[in-house]
Amino acid sequence: GEGAGWTLHQFVCMTFWCVCTSLLLLTACKDPGIMLGPTEIPPHIAADESQFRDWRFCQKCQIYQGPLTAHCNDCKVCIDELDHHCPWMSKCVGKGNMKWFKLFNLSWVIYFVYALMSSFT
């Protein structure tokens, strides 16, 4: 009957919504790169002064942090390649979920531009 099918616009919007929601869930559910060690500096790092000076000891986690690792005070863990703690997900964004975070942001920006453009047509 008439009105029973979806319009192209409705289909595109629902598809974007599903993609955005899926990527948000992947970002939120993936391990951001929680570091559980090392508790001692690896010998190959300790032997190389240029690499050794970039390592720090985290007093809270009791582990050594590599050059790109940082402690998140909200999550109370060290994260490999920590970018930031996201208050909306209550989760860190780091090495383990960065790909999904970038794809999520790309998808909602494209969705927003599509919705904005379609509102003027």
Image (tube, grey):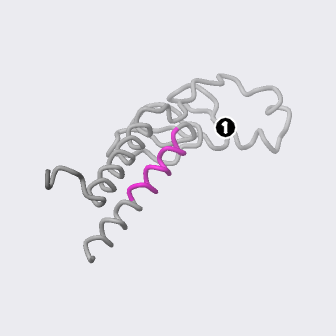
Counting from the top left corner in percent of width and height, residue 113 is at 37, 67
Is 102 a magenta residue?
yes
- Seen in the picture, residue 115 relative to 86 is either above or below; the reply is below
x and y percentages locating residue 7 in the rendered image: 25, 58
Residue wearing tag 1:
66
Q: Nearer the viewer, residue 95 or 117?
A: 117
Q: Residue furthest front?
A: 1
Position of 81 compared to 42: left or right?
left
Question: Which residue occupies the foreground of this view, 85 or 121?
Answer: 121
Quarter placement of the C terminus: bottom left
79 within the magenta span: no
Residue 88 drawn at (x, y percent): 32, 46
Q: Left or right: 7 with respect to 81?
A: left
* Label 1 crowd bin: few (<14), some (14–19), many (20+), radius 10 Å: many
Which image quadrant is residue 40 in? top right
Q: Please provide percent x and percent y for residue 21.
A: 35, 44
Residue at the spot 46% in from the left edge and 57% down from the top edge = 106
In this picture, residue 84 sits left or right of residue 16: right
Q: Single out the residue that lies furthest toward the right.
A: 47
> Helix or strand or loop: what does disc 1 sit on?
loop
- Magenta stretch: helix, strand or loop mostly: helix
The magenta-colored residue range is: 97-108
- At x 57%, y 29%, the residue is 35
**Which of the 4 image quadrants contains residue 89?**
top left
Q: Residue at x 43, y 37 (%)?
A: 26
